[in-house]
Image (tube, rainbow, N blue to C red):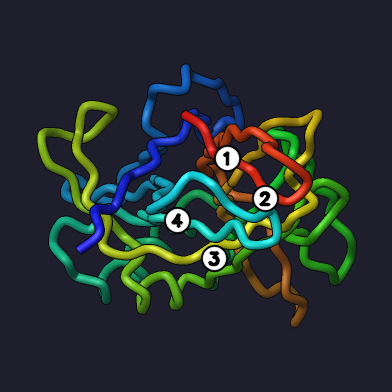
């Protein structure tokens, strides 16, 4: 079997606490944000990108995005949704009925959300494109959680239960830019007077991908 080479791409962490503050840590830190459901379980988002090659045609850069949207040491998938919604409804003034986890490709690490009446705020804008949208049920049914060994935190070894394929659009590979970002962002969803609404949550991860444009049709990913 061909040995799979893990691309441990430059990964940075955004720590987003409930007050809305954030800070960036050096690239060697693993992306992880954690909060407590109960004294016995932890919810967080952690991600990693892997591939079995480094050189791609720009029209076909498909990578494996390992997603840990929840810490689930016990393996009890049914309990995740119940605990998640119970936790969110303790901290919000509205009743959260669902969540979306949206995977973006972007040229800029910083996001600005604009809310319009009766419109979802997860959308494509210039320089930012949705690669995948995952509901809470899809995340649970798809086993998008993780466990850890040797402690929780940057020293803990993450074991992902599952991954998804993402294909980065060709226009993101720019000879001047030389880097792009894959961000997984969580949105809270609820109904108000029969209207579906979204609000950006407090949890996200961001992976910085560096590359070299070798010619007009070929790029190479670098550490």
User: Where does the image place residue 102, in percent across and percent down from the top left?
Assistant: 60, 59
Q: Label 2, secondary structure: give it.
A: strand
- CA gap, disc 1 and disc 3: 35 Å
- CA gap, disc 2 and disc 4: 12 Å
Residue 206's mark? none
Q: Earlier in the sequence, mark 3 or mark 4?
A: 4
Q: Residues within 10 Å of mark 1 (few under 14, many from 20)?
A: some
Q: Viewer-nearest of labels 2 and 1?
A: 1
Above or below, 223 relative to 5:
above
Q: Viewer-nearest of labels 3 and 4?
A: 4
* Residue identified by numbered label 2: 105
- Residue under the image location 26 percent in, 62 percent down: 161
Q: Residues within 10 Å of mark 4 (few under 14, many from 20)?
A: some
Q: Earlier in the sequence, mark 2 or mark 1?
A: 2
User: Where does the image place residue 46, in percent across and percent down from the top left?
Assistant: 39, 45
Q: Viewer-nearest of labels 2 and 3?
A: 2
- Residue under the image location 58 percent in, 52 percent down: 56
The front one of 119 and 127 is: 127
Above or below, 44 relative to 131:
above
For the residues labelled 1 and 4, say whether their Cβ atoms are less than 8 Å apart.
Answer: no
For the residues labelled 2 and 1, say whether their Cβ atoms are less than 8 Å apart.
Answer: no
Q: Earlier in the sequence, mark 1 or mark 3?
A: 3
Q: Label 4, secondary structure: give it.
A: strand
User: Where does the image place residue 18, in percent across and percent down from the top left?
Assistant: 52, 35
Residue 220's mark? 1
* Residue identified by numbered label 3: 99
Tell me if I can see residue 120 in this picture.
yes
* Residue identified by numbered label 4: 65
């Amino acid at each position: 079997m061909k040995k799979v080479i893990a691309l441990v791409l430059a990964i940075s962490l955004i720590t987003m606490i409930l007050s809305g503050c954030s800070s960036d840590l050096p690239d060697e830190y693993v992306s992880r944000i954690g909060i407590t459901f109960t004294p016995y379980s932890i919810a967080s988002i952690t991600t990693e990108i892997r591939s079995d090659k480094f050189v791609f045609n720009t029209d076909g850069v498909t990578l494996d995005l390992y997603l840990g949207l929840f810490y689930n040491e016990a393996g009890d998938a049914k309990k995740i949704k119940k605990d998640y919604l119970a936790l969110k409804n303790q901290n919000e003034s509205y009743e959260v009925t669902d969540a979306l986890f949206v995977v973006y490709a972007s040229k800029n690490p910083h996001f600005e959300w604009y809310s319009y009446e009766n419109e979802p705020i997860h959308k494509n804008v210039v320089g930012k494109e949705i690669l995948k949208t995952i509901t809470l049920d899809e995340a649970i049914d798809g086993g998008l959680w993780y466990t850890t060994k040797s402690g929780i935190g940057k020293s803990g070894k993450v074991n992902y239960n599952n991954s998804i394929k993402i294909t980065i659009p060709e226009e993101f590979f720019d000879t001047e830019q030389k880097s792009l970002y894959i961000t997984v962002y969580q949105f809270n969803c609820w109904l108000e007077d029969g209207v579906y609404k979204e609000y950006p949550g407090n949890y996200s991860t961001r992976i910085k991908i560096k590359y070299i444009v070798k010619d007009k049709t070929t790029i190479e990913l670098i550490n």
